[in-house]
Amino acid sequence: AQSVTQLDSHVSVSEGTPVLLRCNYSSSYSPSLFWYVQHPNKGLQLLLKYTSAATLVKGINGFEAEFKKSETSFHLTKPSAHMSDAAEYFCVVSDSNYQLIWGAGTKLIIKP
Amino acid sequence: ETGVTQTPRHLVMGMTNKKSLKCEQHLGHNAMYWYKQSAKKPLELMFVYSLEERVENNSVPSRFSPECPNSSHLFLHLHTLQPEDSALYLCASSQGKNYGYTFGSGTRLTVV
């Protein structure tokens, strides 16, 4: 069975410092992986996706994620946090027809 | 605006009411989805339509009834809801599973 684990429910960083949001997955075969962001009172926005091409994926707003098959991880990073990055981030895996498996989400808090 | 439009943005309804949520996309996507997002719970997939045919129904109670009249429109008809049905209902569309979903801003539903 497929599953997604976001290892931290909350991450707090200071503005201008690096961001790391961790995600581990389990899948019976090669998955597609996504990160979505949800700002308060807004819908979900696709940040980036991995679909078996390059393992380092660049997304919007300076975020990137690296697919590591040996570690079954797809961690999201950004070199320098901005106040506007404060939001909830979801790691998602898809390896069946239309079913997406969602992580529980990580709330990113940015301290001034 | 993401290209997926949901109306209304907010809805308050009594348990005996009948109402409908509407979703519209003009992205040329061939699949549309209804999700339920409740506080402190992972995102729950409710229904999937691919090329106007329902392909997934995740054990959703019959008080929720989806309708997909064409590839651009998706409805969720609601009747005799319960207070625990109060949540954010998100519509999404995609062009196949590997391209990620585009989400609407959601309808915040409160059942009183």
Image (cartoon, rainbow, N blue to C red):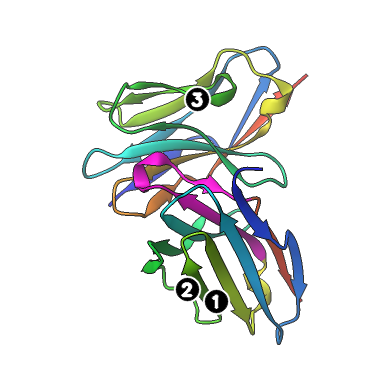
In reply to whether residue A21 is colored magenta, the answer given is: no
Residue type, mark 2 in image: Val
**Depth check, front residue: B89 or B84:** B89
Q: Chain of mark 2?
A: B
Residue B42 appears in view: no
Cα–Cα gap, marks 3 and 1? 35 Å
Secondary structure under the numbered disc 3 in the rendered image: loop
Give the residue pinned by disc 2.
B60
The answer to whether the residue labelled 3 contacts the one labelled 2, judged by CB atoms less than 8 Å apart, is no
Quick one: label 3, few (<14), some, or many (20+) residues within 10 Å? some
Looking at the rendered structure, the secondary structure element under dot 2 is loop
Residue most toward the bottom? B16
Residue carrying label 3: A59
Circles 3 and 1 on the same chain: no
Query: On the picture, is B36 further left or further right than B28?
Result: right
Q: Which residues are magenta?
A: B87-104
User: Distance of mark 3 from mark 2, alpha carbons?
Assistant: 34 Å
1 and 2 marks in contact (CB < 8 Å): yes
